[in-house]
Image (cartoon, helix red, strand yellow):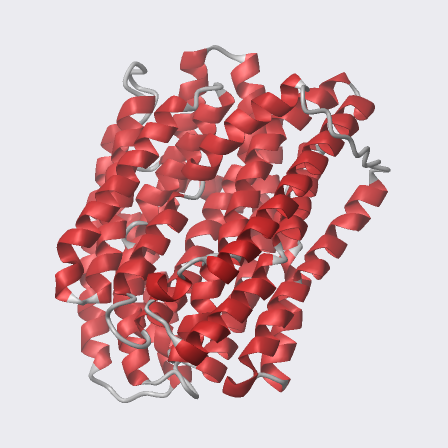
Amino acid sequence: MEQNKKTVTAISLVTAVTLVAKLLGVIREALQADAFGTTLQFDLYSTAYNHTVYLFTTLAYALCVAAVPIISKKLAEGREPAERVTGNLISVCVVLSLFLCGVGYLLIRFAPIGRWFGLTGENLTKLQAYLRICLATLPLIVLIYLLVAAMQSMGYYSLQGSMSLPYNLALIVFLAFFASAERMEEYVLAVCLAWLLQLAMILPSARKEHFRLRPALRLKDPDLRLFGRTALVTLFTTSIFLWCYLADTNTVSTYGDGAVSGVYYADKLFTPVATTLIYSISVVLFPKFNMEFTRTGEQEYKRYVGGTLGNTLFVILPFSVLFSAFSLPMIQVLFERGNFDRASSAMTAGIFSMYALGMAGFCVLDIINKAYYTMRKTLAPLLINGVVLAVNLGLNQLLSGQEKPGLIALATALALSVGGLLALLCFFRRSKGAFPVSRLLKELVSAAVTGALAYLCADALSALEQSKLLMLAEYAVLGVVGIVFYGLLCWLLGDREAITMMLGRFRKGRT
């Protein structure tokens, strides 16, 4: 019981820190929309960012996930073995990233980038310049995330969320006082330099732990080989939404100016709302998965994962349908100003509403991927996520002729949902009772009814001309009412476990 309380407390802290960081990120994106809108120039920036910094961050996060079990295991032997393996992983990965930077610069110079993205002349030159600036962040991002892996292994669970606080604040200041449509290249440079602030946020934790980095290049180290195998699989499985998102942006790039920007802004709203809780839970639970799997048998471990997943889905499902129903007012309140006009809001909202419906599938994939990694099983998550990408690409191809970005986002939501269902079937197929299927069905019914009513309310209110402040108040109240209504439906259907636990914690907090 005491261990569970500590786990919930750690998750609550990580969620709070991550939420603040994500809110600052949304403010940053809102100021960005005001300054740049959904123009061709912002399409160039988002294309460069997606294929460099966004990709590098996802790559580095995969390296972090792969490194945590290795460093945690070495910590059990002592601080020095953990420092040595961390130093070797960082040294090898940074050297490799420098090599990849060199290859990237050659590709920018000689590869037919213009033909790939349909650009010529000045626009192609600008894209190449943005790509060159962003490419230089790869070694820095790799270093940052591997240091985060070491700190997470030592119990600094909130570090991954908190390190983006100064990054977002710095960019908010730049956007508020210096940004304009004519200063796009300066903004690209600011985005890249701001990563140094994320590195600076890690150093106090390392100093507090007296952590000593021991650089080395031990290429024959068995831990390095294990890390390499795990990282390759993890890179694909933990970044499945990124691959779907890149497929979406490439599909809509032929739809005209602004379509790529619409997908970009929808993703930048979807990613914070989807990952704040999901990643906060998984960051805390991933090291605990390792301890639980070591301490108990496989069946008990799967029941532990099933309970965690069931409680997470209970929270995710109502937010999924409410975000989808209220997508237009959310986009209008956050982004509609300056160069981001009513048409930009309508397009971006249509994309975001579809992405939001894929939150549950995204949640299942993330947690079960990590549950598999703990069991040292990588083939199953690799195949499952391969199915997700194949379904997404197939649906994109099927729907591309409609030239509606919202349909392309729906393809991603469907692919994630298919992957989540497949992951549940594979992980729990020989563990009867480990995952509460009847409970999930009740929550799906409750979420569907809640979502239908929310759509009706949003449709009725959309006809009214209202200020953004009034819209914010109205939809905030509707959101709270929707969550309470969802909880009441679950209670009436007999799904009371999570509600009872939350009420119990609330009463203890009051006494």
Task: Specify the quadrant of the image occupied by residue 96.
Answer: top right
Number of numbered discs visible in the structure rendering? 0
As drawn, the residue found furthest toward the front would be 110
Q: Nearer the viewer, residue 75 or 388?
A: 388
Lateral position of residue 344 relative to residue 376, left or right = left
Give percent across and percent down for residue 435.
32, 25
Lateral position of residue 235 relative to residue 13, left or right = left
Q: Please state, as top left, top right, bottom left or bottom right, where the N terminus lies in the image.
A: top right
As drawn, the residue found furthest toward the top would be 297
Q: Nearer the viewer, residue 351 or 275?
A: 351
Q: Is residue 491 above or below residue 133?
A: above
Q: Is residue 268 above or below residue 506?
A: below
Give percent across and percent down for residue 250.
31, 59
Q: Is residue 495 above or below residue 114?
A: above
Lateral position of residue 66 relative to residue 267, left or right = right
Question: Which residue is located at x 67 percent, y 26 percent?
Answer: 72
Question: Which residue is located at x 62 percent, y 70 percent?
Answer: 189
Task: Specify the quadrant of the image occupied by residue 123.
Answer: bottom left
Q: Nearer the viewer, residue 123 or 279?
A: 123
